[in-house]
Image (cartoon, rainbow, N blue to C red):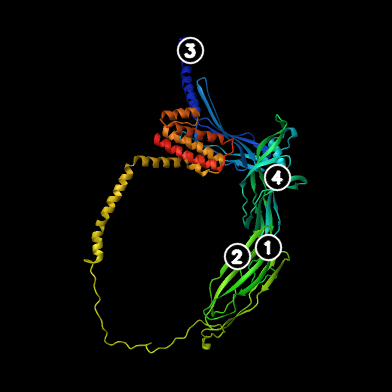
Amino acid sequence: MKKIGNIFMKNRKLFLLGPLLLFALILHAQDEDAVTFEMRLSKPKLGLNERLRVDFTMNKDGDNFNPPDFEGFRVLMGPSQSISSSWINGVRSYSKTYSYTLAPTAKGKFTIKQATIVIGGVTYKSLPKEVEVTAAVDKPSDQMTADDIADENLHLVAEVSKTDPYLNEAISVVYKLYVSPNISVSNYQPLDNPKYNNFWSQDIKVSRLSAQNGTYQGKPYRYVVLKRVVLYPQKTGKLEIEPLSLDVTVDVPTNRRDFFGGRIYSQTNKTVSAGKRTINVKSLPTANQPADFTGAVGDFDFAVTTSKTSLNASESLQAVVEVSGKGNLKLFKLPEPDLPSSLEVFEPEFNERVRTTLSGMQGKVSNSYTIVPAYRGKYPVPPVSFSYFNPDTKKYHTLNSDEILINVLEGPTKSSNSASPSGVTSNKHKVIASGNQFNFIKLKPNLSAKSISYFFGSNLYYILLFGPLLLIPLAIFLRKKRDAIASDVIGNKVKKANKLARKYLSAAKKQLGDKDSFYVALEKALHNYLKAKLKIETSEFSKDKISELLTKKKIEEATVTDFIGLLQNCEAARYSPFSDVEMQRDYEKASEVISLMDKEL
């Protein structure tokens, strides 16, 4: 009896352990099926002269990977892709990683935002992470990399002619790239062009880039003037000029020598920034400001002239109000002459002859008025005043023109009783009486009945009746044309193929001009096209495998060669410079290849 009880207890334990083991196996299977997509940083804190590695890792293969914009960093390398797959004790382990190497562009705390990927038709997002960038970290000279040497020997400077101008006073900004004799620059391209908010701005063309000798922080340097701009502040207070940023290719000498004893150089890319500049704009003084002041700031001359002073009625003359000199010539309103009402005046024609140099605008602006007198007489044009502020003397100045007398020799005379009491002539004309001005009312009118028109039998009736019959031949012609288009199988297939190519390449077209983004999008478009047409994932296939697959589908050899060549260009673009012309050529080639393949599949 005791043995039976022991057996029962053992069976009872096994009975209880069975469901627990089954439950654990289910949980383990669910863990294996769970999708993970995460971002990993090589370090949460780094110096301005250090590098950051960012990995986006997933445990399932996915499509349409979209990285964040990496605000505050410059992408040095990436995306590079690695895949790890293994079987251990019958359990499959899979990992796919997209890696980037970043260089910080400024100090501060930055957030690397979410990346997204589509796995099994579901979009997954990584969690954002914060990175702190501190001042440059000191390194021993024997541990200095090419990037460290470039940091110390390359500087972009914005030289401002005046940091405390008056409102509407000209200042200039000259951007210079200083290069130490220890390194050399082989290429550069702008990343962020400055925006001059609350400034009127005009670029001064740099006709030729030439290196000049100079000093930077007391040390001998060579420099190149890259950009010159003239600014007129349009708002008082503290205004900021956004920085100019460049991506510069730098050749740094190493301690190694080639076979002939020449020094071997290491090439690196650096991002340099001129930094923000603050301009403290002073308001114009309100004391002694003339009533007719309209915002002119500078040093000017003023004149009012006429093309002639004697003429006949109904003839015309030109009156010109002109301001010349140096200052904000395009930014103020010209004064208007006060002309008698008896002179017909047309809208003025504005003329501008202004050139802009580093010191500001110089030249003249004018309004030309066309004046036509209606009556004989003498018409005085009173003096016109013009006021401006001179920032050199820090005073307002007022200039007055001379009075001009316009003498109309021939023409009708204006009646004296038509003049207004104030002496201003009137434009009213006398009413001349005539014998037939008023007539008697007719006592016996000759009235006739108004004709009545009927719709039936009218022109409109016949147009509406026979018009639809005339449309029958047109309908037959359009029907035949539509049938001809529908029967053109080859033409329709070409149109459909071209439309499909535009669909898959739309993302790549938006990235034209950005080499890395364009070729990533182009490679993704080519693989997505194959996935849609062949119903298989080809992103992990070798090019030989893809070539073999397309050949089996009876794609022409030339088309297959072009397709594989595009994939090779996408890979080579990560490590080689590609021009905008080459990107445009590859885009057009991809569109052509997809169209050809779609007709052959």
Q: How many marks?
A: 4
State the CA–CA distance, disc 2 to disc 3.
Answer: 113 Å
**Relative to 388, does residue 504 appear above or below in the rendering?**
above
Mark 3: amino acid? Asn
Neighbourhood count class around disc 2 (C-alpha, 10 Å): few under 14, some 14–19, many 20 upward: few
Q: Nearer the viewer, mark 1 or mark 3?
A: 1
For the residues labelled 4 and 1, say whether their Cβ atoms are less than 8 Å apart. no
Which of the two discs, 1 and 3, labels the residue nearer the N terminus? 3
Q: Kindly state the secondary structure of the residue where label 3 is placed.
A: helix
For the residues labelled 2 and 4, say whether their Cβ atoms are less than 8 Å apart. no
Q: In this figure, which residue is indicated by the disc labeled 4?
A: 155
Name the residue rendered at 31%, 48% in the picture.
Answer: 481
Q: Is residue 566 left or right of residue 493?
A: right
Neighbourhood count class around disc 4 (C-alpha, 10 Å): few under 14, some 14–19, many 20 upward: some
Q: Nearer the viewer, mark 4 or mark 3?
A: 4
Whole-percent x and y of residue 431?
44, 86
Whole-percent x and y of residue 186?
66, 41
